[in-house]
Image (cartoon, helix red, strand yellow):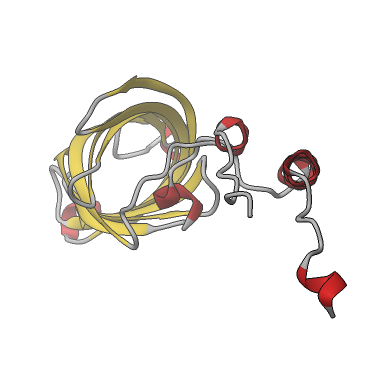
């Protein structure tokens, strides 16, 4: 019993060696496929979704959901321009690069591809009530840190293949050009410290007895 009371504490060098091994194991686990990307914000890792509106050509309601830190799916619904009808648009979007980082938010650049469907009403378009289109373009987005808000602008040339046929009522091409905003739901806490940076911080050693 007296021997246990006066047992010498574990040397500090041994504790530091154990901490280094634990850090190496954690780094290997982070490098495995499917691990979170270092430096990505907590907002992106939580795969948030947002709703909002766009103003331009055309003006729509919009929803966006992240399926990974870089990939997202968006949907748009609004009135058509020029004739009575509804336009529905679905897109796959991918973040390509961070253009700038500010204290109030991050500006990112990306591209998108998608398809659109125009449902047209009225006697003027009775011979062509539906139009199908395919599109591809680019976008920029400013994600704010203080509030869960994203401001974006996009441009996407659109081709309507069926309007290339003889007798079509519309031009075979148009462009999506709009600016908008989305309010995102989820935890807005941003974490920008990667695991390697955290491992470089000096560990707090317990005081020697």
Q: Is residue 155 visible?
A: no
Q: Nearer the viewer, residue 55 or 197?
A: 197
What residue sits 79% from the left and 56% below the top? 8
Q: Is residue 86 left or right of residue 98?
A: left
Compared with 206, 109 (above or below) is above
Q: Is residue 146 left or right of residue 67?
A: left
Residue 137, located in which quarter of the rendered image? top left
Q: Nearer the viewer, residue 94 or 207?
A: 207
Q: Nearer the viewer, residue 201 or 76?
A: 201
Compared with 199, 42 (above or below) is below
Residue farthest toward the top in the current orientation of the protein: 99
Quadrant in which the N terminus is drawn: bottom right
What residue sits 21% from the left and 61% below the top? 121
Q: Is residue 84 left or right of residue 42?
A: left
What residue sits 25% from the left and 25% below the top? 102
Q: Position of residue 181 (x, y in %)?
A: 19, 45
Residue 152, located in which quarter of the rendered image? top left
Q: Position of residue 206 (x, y in %)?
A: 59, 51
Residue 160, located in which quarter of the rendered image? top left
Quadrant in which the C terminus is drawn: bottom right
């Amino acid at each position: 019993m007296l021997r246990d009371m006066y047992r010498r504490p574990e040397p500090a060098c041994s504790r530091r060696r154990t901490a280094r091994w634990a850090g190496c194991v954690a780094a290997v686990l982070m490098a495995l496929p499917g691990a979170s990307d270092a430096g990505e914000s907590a907002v992106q890792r939580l795969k948030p979704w947002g709703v909002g509106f766009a103003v331009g050509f055309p003006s729509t309601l919009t929803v966006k959901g992240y399926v990974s830190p870089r990939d997202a799916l968006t949907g748009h619904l609004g009135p058509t321009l020029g004739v009575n009808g509804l336009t529905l648009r679905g897109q796959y979007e991918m973040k390509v690069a961070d253009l700038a980082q500010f204290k109030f938010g991050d500006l990112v650049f990306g591209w998108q591809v998608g398809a659109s469907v125009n449902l047209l009403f009225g006697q003027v378009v009775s011979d062509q009530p539906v139009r199908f289109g395919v599109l591809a373009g680019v976008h920029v987005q400013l994600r704010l840190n203080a509030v869960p808000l994203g401001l974006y602008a996009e441009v996407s040339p659109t081709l309507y293949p069926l309007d290339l046929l003889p007798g079509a009522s519309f031009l075979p091409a148009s462009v999506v050009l709009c600016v908008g905003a989305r309010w995102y739901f989820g935890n807005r806490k941003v974490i920008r410290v990667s695991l390697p940076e955290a491992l470089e911080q000096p560990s707090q050693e317990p005081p020697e007895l």
